[in-house]
Image (cartoon, rainbow, N blue to C red):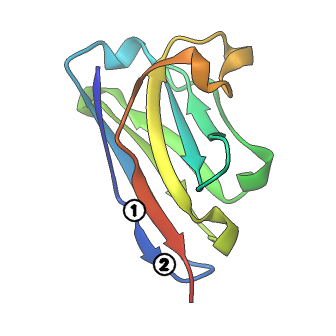
């Protein structure tokens, strides 16, 4: 599976962005999709995940109530809607595909394929 993330940019605190991750060349509809983020000098942090059917989905506590993950299997795309953005949300955001047990959805090592990352900067 090849993954292409897009939608990052500069936004003011309190603003919104929607990230997209388009998949090709594999079985997107059977993959659990994850979103992670990383800032320089820090480990990659899990943000959200959604199972292949979309029935199971979850977000990290740090973004709960502000971020929503969704997917459109016919379009081979997964989304991360980010609202009420804060400066601490500034990071490179990566999408990933894999088949982790749901209990390991937050572990980067559980995903086989990664997109190139898209930069989100939250600043006034």
Figure check: 5 above or below 75: below
**Residue 43: x %, y % from top left:** 67, 41
Quarter holding residue 48: top right
**Residue 95: x %, y % from top left:** 45, 37
Q: Residue at x 65, y 9 (%)?
A: 101
Whether residue 16 is visible here, answered yes or no, is no
Counting every numbered tag in the picture gives 2
Q: Give the number of the disc on residue 8.
A: 1
Q: Give the alpha-carbon distance from disc 1 to disc 2, as whole Å.
A: 9 Å
**Residue 7: x %, y % from top left:** 35, 59
Q: Residue at x 68, y 28 (%)?
A: 106
Figure check: 73 above or below 123: above
Q: Nearer the viewer, residue 24 or 77?
A: 24
Q: Residue at x 25, y 14 (%)?
A: 26
Q: Residue at x 77, y 53 (%)?
A: 62
Q: Nearer the viewer, residue 21 or 92?
A: 92
Instruction: Give the secondary structure at mark 2.
Output: strand
């Amino acid at each position: 599976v090849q993954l292409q993330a897009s939608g990052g940019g500069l936004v003011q605190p309190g603003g919104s962005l929607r990230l997209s991750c388009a998949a090709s060349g594999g079985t997107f509809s059977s993959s659990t999709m994850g979103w992670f983020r990383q800032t320089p000098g820090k480990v990659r942090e899990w943000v959200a995940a959604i199972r292949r059917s979309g029935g199971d989905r979850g977000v990290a506590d740090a973004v709960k109530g502000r971020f929503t993950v969704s997917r459109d299997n016919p379009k081979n795309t997964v989304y991360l809607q980010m609202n009420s953005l804060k400066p601490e949300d500034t990071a490179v955001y990566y999408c990933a595909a894999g088949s982790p047990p749901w209990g390991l959805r937050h572990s980067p090592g559980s995903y086989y394929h990664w997109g190139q990352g898209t930069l989100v900067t939250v600043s006034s």
